[in-house]
Amino acid sequence: MSTTKGYRDFVIEKLQLLENITYKAMMGEYLLYNNGVLFGGIYDNRLLIKPVMSNKKFALSMQIPYENAKPMYYLSDDLTPEQLKEIITETLKDL
């Protein structure tokens, strides 16, 4: 299954508090960047971010984005734009 454009748009709108968010389509999924720094992606209609030291404090669950990939932190759909901004800002500190 690949990510729908509707879900991509939903995620991008929820990331509106972060400046300079861009995405690239990649084999039916979307890689997410902030100021050119890859921090995560949208895989199978799930928002996932790279695990780094600075975002461990959020105690997020880990999921596999695709077969044979390293696990990433899952950001659930019920997180607010403010919560997403905080988590992603912390993540970017270590990238």
Image: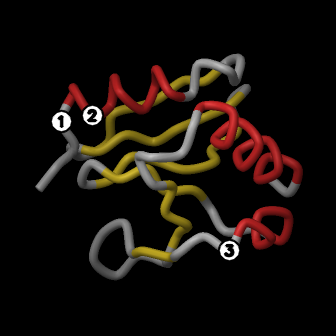
Other residues around mark 2 within 10 Å, as few (<14) / some (14–19) / many (≥20): some
Query: Image height check: is 69 above or below 93?
Result: below
Where is mark 2, residue-wise?
7
Q: Amino acid at mark 3?
A: Ala
N-terminal label among 1 and 3: 1
**Residue 4: image tag:** 1
Query: Nearest the camera: 37 or 57?
Result: 57
Instruction: Tell me the quarter of the image containing the N terminus.
Output: bottom left
Residue at x-position 52% and y-position 38%: 32
User: Residue 4, percent across and down?
Assistant: 18, 36
Nearer the observer, disc 2 or disc 3?
3
N-terminal label among 2 and 3: 2
Residue at the limit of the structure toward the left, as seen here: 1
Q: Measure the alpha-carbon separation of dots 2 and 1.
A: 5 Å
Where is mark 3, residue-wise?
59
Q: Amino acid at mark 2?
A: Tyr
User: Residue 38, percent across and down?
Assistant: 63, 44
Residue at x-position 60% and y-position 35%: 33
Other residues around mark 1 within 10 Å, as few (<14) / some (14–19) / many (≥20): some
Residue at x-position 41% and y-position 46%: 77
User: Residue 20, percent across and down?
Assistant: 67, 18
Display coloring: secondary structure
